[in-house]
Amino acid sequence: MAALTREETEALIQEVLEVYPEKAKKDRAKHLMINDKELESSKKCITSNRKSLPGVMTMRGCAYAGSKGVVWGPIKDVISISHGPIGCGQYSRAGRRNYYVGTTGIDSFCEMNFTSDFQEKDIVFGGDKKLAKLINEIEGLFPLNKGISIQSECPVGLIGDDIEAVAKKAAKELNKPVVPVRCEGFRGVSQSLGHHIANDSVRDWIISNRDGQAFEKTPYDVAILGDYNVGGDAWASRVLLEEMGLRVVAQWSGDGTLAEMENTPFVKLNLLHCYRSMNYISRHMEEKYGIPWLEYNFFGPTKIKESLRKIASYFDDSIKEGAERVIAKYTPMMEAVIAKYKPRLQGKKVMLYVGGLRPRHVVGAYEDLGMEVVGAGYEFAHNDDYDRTIKEMGDATLIYDDVTGYEFEEFVKAMKPDLIGSGIKEKYVFHKMGVPFRQLHSWDYSGPYHGCDGFAVFAKDMDLTLNNPCWNMMQPPWQEKPAKSLLKDPLLKAA
Amino acid sequence: MANIMIRKNEKGYSFYMPKRDIEDSIVSMEFDTPEKWGGEIKLGNGGAYYIEPQTAPARLPYSVRARRIDGVE
Ligand code: SF4
């Protein structure tokens, strides 16, 4: 059951769009849809991956964010230089909480900010010399780096620097991969093109580095793609795969290394968690190396079970048995989690607005807890993402693409969800409106949420947020009705 | 002319255009025999492309140049 009926949702969309000028209204109407599970393709109902409307508040990022922040940044032994002015790198530094094992500044570098710190003179005279010098400095100060990537920020593209030439020369001198990435922020309409550019640069500069070399293979080699180890996600996923008997050769790119990426062409199967940001390289490896790829979902017990079986179906009986063993082992634990939290969360409504995979992937986890997702949307999805989303979401639920700040607020006011999951930019707006909120990009400083261990954390976090007594005290004392007394709160009484 | 990638999934052939990130199903392909493969392909979204008829690729996915005949991007 959706929060509203199809007609009500339709009316809501019309009402919200009413304030826009005619042209804007027409444009935005194409980005909003009411879900119909029967649909085969989203194409006719929703438009996506288009330039945001000028004048509205969009929540998208830039191509640099997609490349440096998402794909390249988490590779721990590669130093990613934010090439250009200092701000782009500094304000996005370590914000995604891609955990890793290693000693920062010695053999791992994710949390540090390397930048060429462009000044006026670099814009006027070009920054190539500075870049070459910077690469040498890096090599001197951090000799244990395994490679360097150059992430261009906007000005580099504007002034037309030849970072490829610098990279080639440096790579020869250092005898390590130095990868120029043309991910200037102005490319494309959102961070999505940045993922694509980053994937292409991995394809061109990394993936074939070890072709023809010896590699100790097993029939059970897999790679985890599109898991950025936010709050330890990839670790929670990896244990499940290893327990069922698979060998995880590489993690892309959370807690991953350059060597792991170079070894990926040797695996049997690529496991793809975030389709949006890594389908490109998966497709490439499928064509070039004949490695099939499989989308899976490790959020919540139902989807985990489904995915484990699907993964096992690519292997022999020992892995299939392994999958059943893992499921049997973790089922009691997951049932205990559900038994504890479902009664506290049952029937609550959730609205989501996140990035690449979460609006559809977490639906199952919420449903496992008896909750219902009544609205979902993506910042930078494409139509193939919506095709996949239609199947996960309930009928007559609201789906919004690149939703504007105004629209999102109005939808929330009308649909009155019990919980919102979105990003940091939206968080405090909704807090002030008195709606429980979880930041679902970096798990609100919590995590992991993937895998069985992650589900326990997920359920607890949702409960802590939703049933927090603070939501009953939102009314300031000078307003008429006195705020509900803490002592009357059933949760606290029970404690 | 654009590069496209043809792959096979449970439902049959699928179409992917890296340049524009368009993924769709292929509802029909004019020639689909080992000796002659390609021709006009129709997509789930109503679009149509033309691949120069050729011998069927030994392995899928397969990247090939295609010309847009009609329709939705
Ligand atoms: S849009 Fe350009 S200037 Fe802004 S953060 Fe992205 S790369 Fe930097």
Image: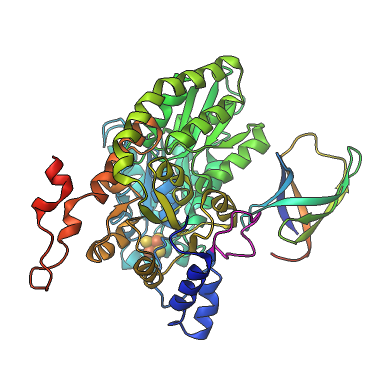
Q: Position of residue A369 (x, y in %)?
A: 38, 41
Q: Residue furthest bottom?
A: A21
Please tell me which residue lies in front, A492 or A139.
Answer: A492
Q: Quadrant of ligand 1?
A: bottom left
Height in image: A316 above or below B29?
Answer: above
Q: Compared to A459, does A380 lie above or below?
A: below
Q: Is residue A419 above or below residue A159?
A: above
- Location of residue A330 in the rendering, given as x and y in whole percent from the top left corner: 40, 24
Work out whether residue B45 can be spotted. Answer: yes
Looking at the image, which residue is at 53% across and 48% down? A392
Residue, far right: B35
User: Magenta stretch: residue A261 in it?
Assistant: no
Q: Residue at x 43, y 76 (%)?
A: A16
The one nearer the camera, A163 or A75, is A75
| Rendered location of residue A274, percent (x, y) | 49, 44
- Of residues A124 and A443, the one nearer the viewer is A443
Q: What segment is highlighted magenta in the picture?
A: A34-48
The structure residue drawn at horizontal position 39% and vertical position 50%, both measured from the top left corner, is A69
